[in-house]
Amino acid sequence: MLVYNIVVMKKLFIFFIVLLSAPAFADPNPMFGTDTRNSVNLYIGQGTGSGSLFKLVDPFLWDFEPITVLMAQYSQPMEIFRLPSRINLDFVQNFGYNSKHGLSFMAIGISWDVAIVNWKGFYIGLGIGLYMRDSRDDYVNSRLVFGERFFIGKNISNRWRAEFFTLHFSNGDFTETNRGFNYTGLSVSYSF
């Protein structure tokens, strides 16, 4: 497993270096409509099993389980290193059901997303955030968690976008119990 993680980490490192070395163009922010300064986003995702950050980009590691996440997000455009970005206020509700009922929690957080690739109405990005949960559980024994997101989006119209995302919550091993939460799902965004 360690050899597999090292190989995946090397591939991810090379992938991100190639993406970050691409020139930044003066295109408008693909996560917002023309002349809009706000957006609201709704996310729904299915749990893909506890585990490491590698589950964000490796679907062969996904193990669907009875956990669903809903997230409402308010966003404003910004730039990070001249790349189109957004700053977000996130409201999260995680539902654990059946045998995972004790894993339900609510959280509020702030996050930042960067669109690394923007091409013909499609965009690819990464995000990171900090969240405060209302409880501890068997997966993560802390209320403070970090969230990492990978997403692929499509501009449907000037005001509407849709994204496929993967999301990981964990506490960065600040406590002994840190199995992490992983999700994959879809989101819809309206810019105004």
Image: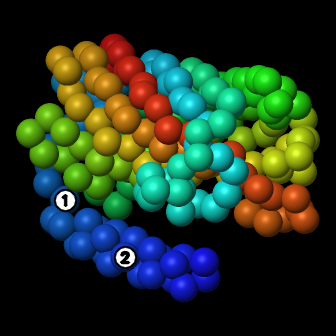
Residue 91's spot in the image, x, y percent? 65, 25
Residue 97's spot in the image, x, y percent? 77, 23
Is 8 drawn above or below residue 31 in the view shown?
A: below
The residue lying toward the viewer, choosing from 178 and 156, is 178
Q: Amino acid at mark 2?
A: Lys
Q: Quadrant of the N terminus?
A: bottom right
Q: Secondary structure at mark 1?
A: loop
Instruction: Write the residue at 66% across / 36% down.
Output: 65
Instruction: Write the residue at 90% across / 41% down.
Output: 136
Residue 11 is marked as 2
Residue 42's spot in the image, x, y percent? 49, 20
Q: Amino acid at mark 1?
A: Ala
Horizontal side of 36 relative to 78 (left or right) equals left
Horizontal side of 26 relative to 97 (left or right) equals left
The residue lying toward the viewer, choosing from 44 and 97, is 97
Mark 1 sits on what residue? 24
The residue lying toward the viewer, choosing from 146 and 53, is 53
Q: How is the image coloured?
A: rainbow
Residue 192's spot in the image, x, y percent? 34, 14
